[in-house]
């Protein structure tokens, strides 16, 4: 009897250990399962890329007469999505929310004429530049006091608060009045509520083409920043940055990038010179 009980006890213990081993095998995830997917993989799995843009900064991103979102960055953003094999989903927001949204992961990428700077590169992963633009200093037609940025000391300008243009104006001693759109900027300038604005040459040229009687003039043209696409600063965005760079190079080699630039800017601004 004692021998039988001993056999039963040994068998019971063996079954228990086997069951525990089976449970551990079934519930332990593989290395592949535990590895977090990078951003590119997430985008391709969900089937769309979320692109931040203003929608009110012609010719970069704006609405045409039919109300359709268009512009240089919209056209390139669609090309990027197409070549990634996903849908482009544009989310329109004000400038100051764009980079914050990229940083938080709300947006996968920003296509909105963002100038590359070393300071920004400390916080964001940037693509290679896709266009190069000049900056211009703009005043009212009757303003004879401001000729160059050196004359901005003690003056006021209108610019989006976190832009490179605002930083440049403050560097030369101006007080910046924050705005959200180019239209608002020009209104403040024409109405005499600010003395000047620094902005992208292509945007001012486009505005003057649409408003040839606007009471503004360009008094100085300055070298511009290379313009690139920012993504979140994290290791899981590296593959997306590489894929976007490959796409931009493909568009550059095929001539499509230059054609898009000519369509919206009237010039090929895809080269540094």
Image (spheres, rainbow, N blue to C red):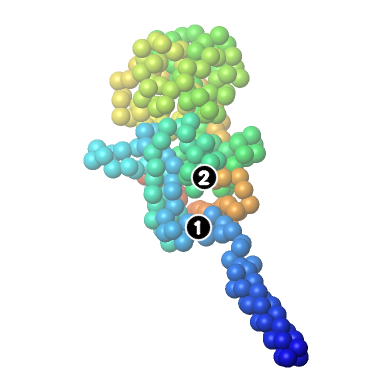
Percent of width and height locating residue 175: 53, 14
Q: Which residue is mark 2?
A: 105
Residue 154 lies in quadrant: top right
Q: Mark 1 or mark 2, which is nearer the start of the sequence? A: 1
* Res 243 seen here: no
Locate residue 66, reporting x and y percent.
23, 40
Q: Quadrant of the N terminus?
A: bottom right
Circle 1: is it few (<14), some (14-19), or many (20+) Cα within 10 Å? some
Quadrant of the frame with the C terminus: top right
**What residue did someone put label 1 on?**
42
Q: Nearer the viewer, residue 45 or 125?
A: 45
Residue 50 visible within the image:
yes
SS at mark 1? helix
Which residue shows up at 76% across the image and 88% down it?
Answer: 2
Q: Residue 83 in the image: x percent, y percent?
A: 44, 60
For residue 231, above or below residue 171: below
Find numbered disc 2 in the image and state the secondary structure of the residue it sits on. loop
Position above or below: 47 against 209:
below
- Residue 35 falls left or right of residue 141: right
**Residue positioned 41% across, 11% down in the render:** 193
């Amino acid at each position: 009897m004692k021998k039988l009980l001993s056999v039963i006890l040994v068998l019971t213990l063996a079954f228990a250990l086997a069951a525990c081993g089976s449970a551990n095998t079934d519930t332990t995830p593989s290395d592949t399962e535990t590895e977090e997917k990078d951003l590119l993989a997430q985008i391709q799995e969900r089937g769309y890329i979320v692109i931040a843009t203003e929608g009110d900064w012609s010719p970069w991103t704006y609405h045409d007469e039919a109300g359709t979102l268009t512009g240089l960055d919209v056209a390139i953003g669609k090309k990027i999505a197409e070549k990634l094999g996903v849908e482009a989903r544009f989310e329109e927001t004000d400038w100051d929310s764009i980079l914050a949204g990229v940083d938080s992961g709300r947006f996968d990428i920003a296509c909105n004429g963002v100038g590359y700077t070393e300071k920004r590169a400390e916080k964001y992963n940037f693509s290679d530049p896709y266009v190069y633009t000049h900056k211009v200093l703009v005043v009212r037609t009757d303003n004879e006091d401001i000729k160059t940025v050196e004359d901005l000391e003690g003056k006021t300008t209108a610019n989006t608060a976190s832009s490179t243009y605002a930083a440049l104006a403050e560097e030369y001693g101006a007080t910046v009045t924050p705005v959200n759109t180019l239209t608002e900027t020009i209104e403040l300038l024409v109405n005499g509520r600010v003395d000047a604005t620094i902005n992208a040459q292509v945007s001012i040229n486009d505005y003057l083409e649409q408003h040839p009687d606007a009471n503004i003039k360009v008094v100085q043209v300055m070298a511009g920043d290379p313009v690139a696409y920012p993504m979140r600063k994290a290791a899981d965005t590296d593959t997306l940055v590489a894929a976007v760079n490959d796409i931009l190079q493909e568009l550059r080699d095929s001539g499509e990038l230059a054609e898009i630039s000519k369509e919206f800017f009237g010039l090929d601004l895809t080269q540094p010179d």
